Image (cartoon, helix red, strand yellow):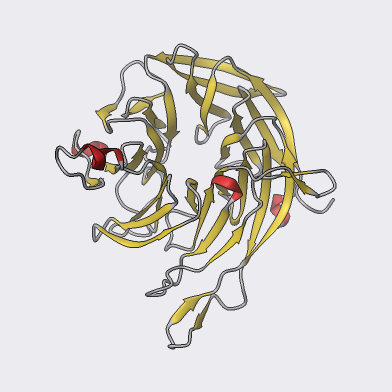
Amino acid sequence: MDKPQMIEHIQQNVDYTIYDVKWIPCSAKFVVLGSKPNSNGILEIYELNEARAEKVKQVVKKTAFKCGSFGASSLRNRHMAIGDFEGRMQVIDLERPDLPVYNVEAHSSIINSIDAIGGKQLNCGAPEIVTGSRDGAVKVWDMRQGAAPVVDISPETVKGDVVNRTERRDCWAVAFGDSYNNSERSVAAGYDNGDLKLFDLRQLAVRWETTLKNGICGIEFDRADIPMNKMGVTTLEGGLLVYDMRTQHPTKGFSFVEERNAGRSVGSNGVITGPKSTVWAIRHLPQNRDVFVSCGGTGSIRLWQYEYPEKRRKPDADNIELGVPGTLNMLHASTVSSQPVHSFDWHPDKLGLAVCGSFDQCVRVLVTTRLNLL
């Protein structure tokens, strides 16, 4: 019993499909984004009150919401950047949600993933939002720069060539990282064919790219506002990879540790069973960057700890520095739902408090114990 335990504190049923859940910073409230049966978008705010979650606000819009982030807003404003199913990106003031603070037709198709940075951190660059869409484009937005993206990373197409137009890869995941001063910043993007690309926004160039065996569902840096340390990547068919981002080899790139069974169910006796299943998301603990959760397609949540090797780099045969990956240690596994758990968010202030959403139309507030002892 010395290991952390993940306990379900509150279970809240809703009458719509959940797509994302996020804690409102510096509060006991969380936001649920989703789609009603008539394809309207719905945003609900819940507040923790003893042993239940009370709904304090509901906002309905004509287009279903897909993803959201508070990363580019200050603690005072708490504006939420939201991507929807028609490719529109809007920033909403949760106190006055009727009129968006910022509203732009960002993409020609659904925005699959959104990430934001720069709102709360000091000396890590401008507040920016990155969106990844089915149209294959990755775009970076600065609300102060008007309706045009500050960076547009779109696949090339030949005009009038229908074949090329349909071959655009679907961008499933985006994440900011390496934003440790006012000029450096990178974006990692994952695509449905397994392509993983790291874009350097200062040089406007692809810094590194590789291709995995399966489509990439989730990407997260352990910290976005430090020099790149680790990057977690989750894929279809149960893939979980953690890259050591400190050392880049000119030909072999970044070294990584891989777990191929991360999406399967884990019984109470620790036996892994069932088919390979998608790992939908990865979320690092804000208070400890070496601890993270992975959310599986079987409704399971696993808590992991990354353990560093004795030396993080070594010379290869040509005496060029090569990164040494660490090891993954599974601390806890629990099945909370019969359907995939696809969204998860740690509370930024309260250690161990988390909220997750799954496709059984249920939001769960979880409490994880003993994280302070790791």
Up-down: is 177 above or below 75? below
Residue 25 % position (x, y): 50, 36
Query: Which image quadrant is residue 41 in?
Result: top left
Up-down: is 214 above or below 54? below
- In the displayed image of the protein, which residue is found farthest to the top? 38
At horizontal 45% and vertical 81% (from top left) the residue drawn is 321
Image position of 273 (left or right of 48): right
At horizontal 31% and vertical 22% (from top left) the residue drawn is 100
Image position of 287 (left or right of 148): right
Q: In this view of the protein, which residue sits in the foreground, 85 or 372?
A: 85
Up-down: is 272 above or below 98? below
Residue 334 % position (x, y): 74, 41
Residue 165 % position (x, y): 25, 39
Residue 329 % position (x, y): 69, 59
Up-down: is 12 above or below 300? above
Q: In this view of the protein, which residue sits in the foreground, 247 or 318?
A: 318
At horizontal 27% and vertical 33% (from top left) the residue drawn is 106
Say how many tags the image has: 0
At horizontal 61% and vertical 42% (from top left) the residue drawn is 295
Query: Which image quadrant is residue 141 in?
Result: top left
- Quick one: quadrant of the C terminus? bottom right
- In the displayed image of the protein, which residue is found farthest to the left? 159
